[in-house]
Amino acid sequence: MTDELIARAAARLTWIRSRMALLADVRERFAESQPFAGHRIGMSLHLEPKTAVLLETLAVGGAEIVATGNHGSTQDDIVAFLRDQGMTIFGARDDTLEQHHANVASVVAAEPDILLDNGADLVAGIVAAGRGAQIVGGTEETTSGGYRLRDELADQVPYPVIVINDSPLKAIGENKHAVGQSVVESFMRITNLMVPGRRFVVAGYGWCGRGVAHYLRALGGKVAIVEVDEIKAFEAALDGYRVANVLDLADWGEVFITATGHPQILGAEFFDRVADGAMLVNCGHFPWEIDVPALRALATGSTEIDTAIERIDLPGERHVTLIADGRMMNLAGREPKGNSIESMDLGFLLQVLSLEQVATATDTLVAGAQPVPDSINREIARRMLATMKADR
Amino acid sequence: MTDELIARAAARLTWIRSRMALLADVRERFAESQPFAGHRIGMSLHLEPKTAVLLETLAVGGAEIVATGNHGSTQDDIVAFLRDQGMTIFGARDDTLEQHHANVASVVAAEPDILLDNGADLVAGIVAAGRGAQIVGGTEETTSGGYRLRDELADQVPYPVIVINDSPLKAIGENKHAVGQSVVESFMRITNLMVPGRRFVVAGYGWCGRGVAHYLRALGGKVAIVEVDEIKAFEAALDGYRVANVLDLADWGEVFITATGHPQILGAEFFDRVADGAMLVNCGHFPWEIDVPALRALATGSTEIDTAIERIDLPGERHVTLIADGRMMNLAGREPKGNSIESMDLGFLLQVLSLEQVATATDTLVAGAQPVPDSINREIARRMLATMKADR
Amino acid sequence: MTDELIARAAARLTWIRSRMALLADVRERFAESQPFAGHRIGMSLHLEPKTAVLLETLAVGGAEIVATGNHGSTQDDIVAFLRDQGMTIFGARDDTLEQHHANVASVVAAEPDILLDNGADLVAGIVAAGRGAQIVGGTEETTSGGYRLRDELADQVPYPVIVINDSPLKAIGENKHAVGQSVVESFMRITNLMVPGRRFVVAGYGWCGRGVAHYLRALGGKVAIVEVDEIKAFEAALDGYRVANVLDLADWGEVFITATGHPQILGAEFFDRVADGAMLVNCGHFPWEIDVPALRALATGSTEIDTAIERIDLPGERHVTLIADGRMMNLAGREPKGNSIESMDLGFLLQVLSLEQVATATDTLVAGAQPVPDSINREIARRMLATMKADR
Amino acid sequence: MTDELIARAAARLTWIRSRMALLADVRERFAESQPFAGHRIGMSLHLEPKTAVLLETLAVGGAEIVATGNHGSTQDDIVAFLRDQGMTIFGARDDTLEQHHANVASVVAAEPDILLDNGADLVAGIVAAGRGAQIVGGTEETTSGGYRLRDELADQVPYPVIVINDSPLKAIGENKHAVGQSVVESFMRITNLMVPGRRFVVAGYGWCGRGVAHYLRALGGKVAIVEVDEIKAFEAALDGYRVANVLDLADWGEVFITATGHPQILGAEFFDRVADGAMLVNCGHFPWEIDVPALRALATGSTEIDTAIERIDLPGERHVTLIADGRMMNLAGREPKGNSIESMDLGFLLQVLSLEQVATATDTLVAGAQPVPDSINREIARRMLATMKADR
């Protein structure tokens, strides 16, 4: 059984690994330079095929790996595969939240000296355990983890933490282009509906919203933008979009997509007005942008009509179609792919080079949360241009 | 077991049927007018979920249905479902070619008086059986079936056959937009690769090639066109594309997509020159545009590295990536969706209204192959505009 | 005075001639082959700088040139320049319509044996004069001239006339791309207004309308289409445009552009409904698409507020802005440029090669109106691809 | 003579004033609130038709106006018109540089208490004259003036100066969209060349370069980007552009456009390699991006072949075409229009509301250079959205 899981993971990794050229280059260098020799990296991250290539790369660089998955996204074949590579991995697909907390605690208890964190959970555990002094430094993947480090954990972190998501490469390469592409791909894959001529309302004109709107319009969709920030709304208007209030668009839109980072963008008042047959999609990180509890409270009935597609009947002989229960559409459906392999390769190189600087040049960094060093951003931008052969 | 198949098909049909608004309108009218009352329609077509909605619609109009699937594409749950609706269906997923021919013969033997044909197989059977005089008329889905009717079967068909694929609505609605959308969706779904900045070579600038090139460029791809017809090449150049010989692009392209309708577009000379790592994709109807036998003859090795993704090693330490063994990419992969539901709804309405004219106004038609009557094209264009609410 | 005019024309021609690469190539060949030696070509065409390069090219090929301008568009410096080159030119900028008819008669009276016609005026003159037997053949620039040749003049023309405007190269290279570009350039040049986010209504989705709509949307405009032909309206909808009735858009549009070929597209009912401040623009050939007389009849006042910009006050404290009095916008303003040099070079090469075939291979042609021979279309497409270096 | 000038300016202003809706709204409010009553505003700015509407607006708000034009751009009819309105205006079109300095000195000597400055010339004069204590505050239009205020003039300016050009509304509304539109319009207007399929190289991917590249590609141009900053180059590559070194593109490009803000982007080494016939265009503020002196030193000959179009012959039987002598293309040609009226309306509203805050709420500001207050940016963004009716 375990052998089967390992074999399945190995097969899934073949294509992905062959297309992560940035990490492949670094692995070659790391095999020589061994930047993580003698270090134990504690990690909290999604355990899926692409991250497996990240872990391999760190291991090639001499790191001992101790990792836990996030709650709900752990893939068992990947866990089996990584364990087979000699890594210490906690977590399984069906873990309860309690079990997940125990996994995080296990990583802390394994006494890592470098951390790759996700939402600052490991840092919080280290602080609580009074083990800060043992830590050389680390990275934090998310913006919200960055806020936590600068707020509730400020002054309690005596070592450097590089916040990956603040890099301009992530805003452009991942939030705008990779999420944009991924959302239009998911929409077509899950619904099998035509894009040209369809009326989309995109709520939020941050990096993700810009990307989603851009790619939908590029494919021939009619796109209107909802944005409360005047400066971003102005940008959307000059980019040629209709910009209006979500309630005023409730009768116009066929597909409503939320990408704001804020809760209850589509709420009770909207559900009152939305036209019969509208489709509700979220692609923000948290499943709160569509107020699903309020929607269900209003509902007179509900039917799962295809994978990730639910019909919800509303009073007044109307219905809406809810995609993926309000969770991120681009991770839903039978065969979700998520962001493109190259965009993950890019994001992981940010992790890897930041961790290398933590391990080998700690003195160039300051204590606490900080952005990715400019030299690393520029180094990666150059590598990406070369890998893409952008000059052709 | 059969009940399970029926239930599965019924579930799969829910979403699709709810989004085929053009057929839904017609069903309502047909329930009254019964245009096919007393007629037995013999059919040869793909038996998959979307076509099931077409068959339902004809049945509501009073038709008795006798149908066979195409060889290799029949879905057993759909067959079970349709039989459960009282239709006579021949064919199963694993039929041999011999069995398939027997199925076609069975449809002919069932003595239909109207035909919905695909490649003129039924017509040929009827002619061979000397049953032409019993036929009121019919439709032919494909352009190549139309050629056959105007060539080898000319003067042997004493009844009208409306050739669906010649309609301008198909060129625009299906070949350009639906195939274009479907190909970019499939590329992203199967490969999980980034489109922006990637170098694509599209061979063929007919309706499909125009659509594929347009959608790839819209998503940020760099697109070059290969086209031997000077007028189409001129159009591509003014549309802003690089237009060159495929051999001159062999070193530039990352992904080569064929959409020409002609064989061996990518052949031995190309394989000699193509750069290491190139991806080869076909989206033409027949699996001959990439000369796969020639490629395999050259190959020094081959590995299936993911669903529909095969690595083929070539002499000189090069390799190429072959998608779906050179068959249509947009029907490949784990969860292929094919053309959008609305574009199929459109194509089926062409079938349904053409068959209605055959059944109820035969005298407006002439014997032999002919285009869809202009009045039907215009009627459907109007309905599609209304269904899309294009005025919003 | 004449010397000054000649010098001015010569200066204006420098840049244009240097960018007409297709004609330059042909001039080189004609200098050798002298296809028009012994022929007198009678012409009716716009006499402006670009056509001067056409006339030079025919003269280099050995032709004797006898030409008249169109009424109202003749440029005196160009006339002086061409006369100085030894050509017989009739017409002046301020000619009356009567004088213009006399000019046409003068060309007929000069006994040409080949005709380059525009609207079939020369042909009509030749037929009236009973001189048809003297004519080897000719070309007709316009579609409407082609209709005339096939209708009122049918069976009266014993020699071949190649109708230039029916070539697919004109539809794509001139009507779609050159007019499209020229209209957006003119709009920006004359009004100095912002395009992104502006609401445009384009009436007509033929080749010109497609081009105008495409370029306006490309620059960030919001574009709605008005089109009575259902098939074209369907195409516009799938191209992602809003498609609606002009009266329903009267309150939405900021700029209304007509490109239909039909009269009174914007008429009394529209003027009743149009929102205050709307701008009315025509880019169709005839100045009848905006019903200017009806507009002036309604007007309560009128002010010329800038070159080619007129404010027309309407009852109900509304006003509209009329551009160029309803004549083609892309020929209006202080410094109109018209279609791009390359698109004219292309159109003129169609003329030149068609006339060469008339002069040297009459037997390959039939009597009466006919399309540009396929071989010429293909030859020119190839040359244009080479000149553009489309393969780079 | 003066009356004629005044009348001419008045006519030119009609259209422009009618399309500056943002300033029109403010004028109405100012007529009541008189924010500048008792203030004398000293100004240094371009004196052309659009700025006249700005000055009118300030005058309506109660300001006494004392202004000088910039050197070389002053339009005499506008000067006459403004004087006729009772303003004190220094400067004429043909002023020497010495005379221009005297004009600046005259504004300083007129003892203004508020300054609208351009390049910090007035501020420097005030500092030199020891009159800083008399000044309530002011605005500075340019980024380079902002640098000067923060550098050589730091600590010498005891009053607030709001730097207009740092506003995000300028970056988006003017640098990206208005300059982008204006450059493509100028290219078409001056050269009359076709854009689709043409090969453009844009040097610089800042806000202006992004806009220029975007609009050229939107019109069908093939666009390559030159950018030394890796992060911006990365953005260009993901936006789908070819990104390469200018020397490597010297043989590929047909039109080279500089928008970098830096000198000698196209210099001797480039001129050595550039392909025959290339066109050189600058749209950066200073005429130094193309090294024109180096180009002329290399030249074997030179001919003015049309307005703003010069042919420069180079050794090796090559030539290049230089537009506008390397000065900003969008201000060149016979009838330059510059940025769109709406974008100037937007920029002037930034000036006007900033000056209002200086005059009426000085205590909300700090001494020295500072960005436009966030509240003003947001207020203007809201007004622009309303004026555009962006919600339609």
Image (cartoon, coloured by chain):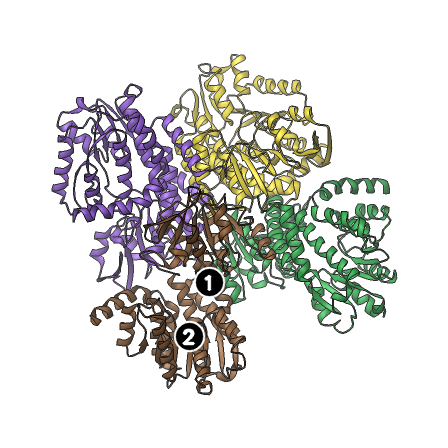
Chain colours: A green, B yellow, C purple, D brown
Residue receiving disc 2 = D352
* Element class at badge 2: helix
Q: Residue furthest bottom?
A: D133
Q: Can residue D174 be seen in this view?
A: yes
Quadrant of the image occupied by residue D24: bottom left
Q: Residue A155's spot in the image, x, y percent?
A: 76, 74
Q: Which of B360 and D308 is in front in this view?
A: D308
Say left or right for B304 vs A322: right
Residue receiving disc 1 = D173
Q: Mark 1 lies on which chain?
A: D
Q: Is residue B148 above or below residue C223?
A: above
Residue type of the residue flagged with mark 2:
Val
Q: In this view, does C128 lie above or below D277?
A: above
* Element class at badge 1: helix
Q: In this view, does B387 lie above or below B316?
A: below
Mark 1 Cα shell of 10 Å, populated few (<14), some (14-19), many (≥20):
many
Quadrant of the image occupied by residue D356: bottom left
Q: Is residue B391 visible?
A: no
Q: How far apart are marks 2 and 1 (CA)?
A: 17 Å
Q: Mark 2 lies on which chain?
A: D
